[in-house]
Amino acid sequence: MISIGELQRLIKSDFTRNVGTLFTGNGISMAVNLLSLPILSRLYTPEEFGSIALYVAIAQLIAVFVSGRYDYALMLPRKSGEALKVALSGVVLSFYMSILVAVVLYFSYDRLLAFFPHPTFARLIWLLPIIGFLLSVRQILSMWFSRRSRFKFTSQSKVLQTVVANGVRLPRAIYANGVAGLWLGFVVSELVALVQGMFFFWKHDYRLLRTSKKTEFKETLAKYASFPMYSMPISFLNSISTNLLIYAFSYSFSASVVGLYERFSKMISVPLDMVSSSFSIVFFQKMSFVSSKRRFYRRAYLVCLLIGGLMNLPVVLWGPKIFSFVLGGNWQFAGEMARYLAPLMVFGFANKCIGTTFSTINKNGVMLVWQLSYLVLTLGWVVVFRDHSVLFIIKTYALLGALLNIVLGVYGYYFVKKADLGTV
């Protein structure tokens, strides 16, 4: 339990103020998304939403791979000049890795295209390596601003990105098809956020560029090689796990089923992800410096469970009715999905908030093993029972995933406790 004194200290801390700053921006973004949901869900079909959901999931997967997760390494150097070398080295690595992805895409193009029913994707798929690179640079910039404690800008950038994405998608009539409108909303919003971040960096930090030399990039990449070796595979697997049902439904069912799930994700999962992204960034910063890591871990984990539970309670009680009212009668089944996935959402949310714990105590290998186990068990379950109904797969997947997340939370506390005692 959290005592009154501990709760008061937590509220007054820099950690909480920074979380509050990010949460404000994410809250506004969430409000914009929720307000646009009833409109966009009536302008575009489930099949169009499903196709774009798979496209975005693949682009995010590429971004994690090409970045090598050197954005996480930005928090480790004591000097900002050294951290900038890590950032620039990560950008260079992302560029060359994107070329590698393009080569792989060339040889697997026909197989990948089979998952996208709309002919527009025949051209859009070729842009995946470029979009993955842009997303990777955005990840690096975002972590750089977090290191510099510029959480206000990060918050404002999130709001701008959300407004642009929804604003581009609203004039459905001007697009030849729905896929083009949804795709442009995604790409334009990412480009706007990237350009804004680059201008902000140039305005405030360009002097630090003088401390970085191209000849040092190779040495810097080697120095922090543990991140592509451990953090990148962990994040890669986590990205697959997060979008596992999108991949599974695309393979076993239709784009329309994926679209129903995507609307659930937008309405329920995305708000949770916004909160967790705010929490996890500041948690990582704070966890690196606190003396009693287990106490901080315990408090943060319990608070996250409480927040996740409260946010999911209405979905458990009135999921189908909420979705029918907000999105329309055709989306009622998305509410059924949300109701049964709620337990998984709560425990997954808590672990996302404190997931960087294993990086701060040099136990990335443990997290990697868990991610592999989670992916094998859940994906194996979905594949084995793919001939069953969608609802059966969702129910059993949610139960298994929730149990695995509980195991990870308990295991994390065990290692944090040993780290405090100096036995790891």
Image (cartoon, grey):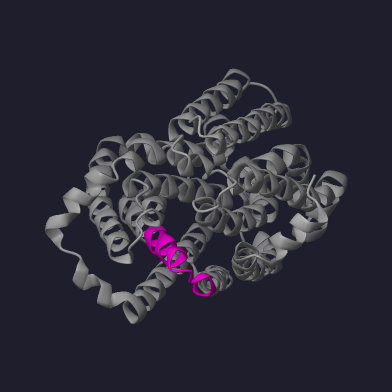
Q: Which residue is drawn at 74% across and 58% down?
A: 327
Dominant SS of magenta comes to helix
Image location (x, y in percent) of residue 353: 60, 49
312 vs 238: above or below: below
Evaluate whether residue 102 shows in this view. Answer: no
State how many labels appear. Answer: 0
Left/right of residue 236 with respect to residue 172 in the rendered view: left
Q: Quadrant of residue 248?
A: top right
Evaluate whether residue 316 shows in this view. Answer: yes
82 vs 288: above or below: below
Q: Residue at x 71, y 64 (%)?
A: 11
Q: Quadrant of residue 379?
A: top right
Task: Tell whether position 151 is magenta.
Answer: yes
Q: Residue at x 32, y 60 (%)?
A: 83
Task: Tell whether position 164 is magenta.
Answer: no
Q: Which residue is drawn at 41% across and 51% down?
A: 72
Q: Is 47 or 133 nearer to us in this picture? A: 133
Left/right of residue 252 with respect to residue 176 in the rendered view: right
Region of the chain picked out in magenta, as a range: 138-153
Q: Is 223 or 266 nearer to us in this picture? A: 223
Q: Which quadrant holds the N terminus?
A: top right
Image location (x, y in percent) of residue 100: 23, 43
57 vs 210: above or below: above
> What residue occupies the far front of the structure in this picture?
421
Image location (x, y in percent) of residue 275: 64, 57
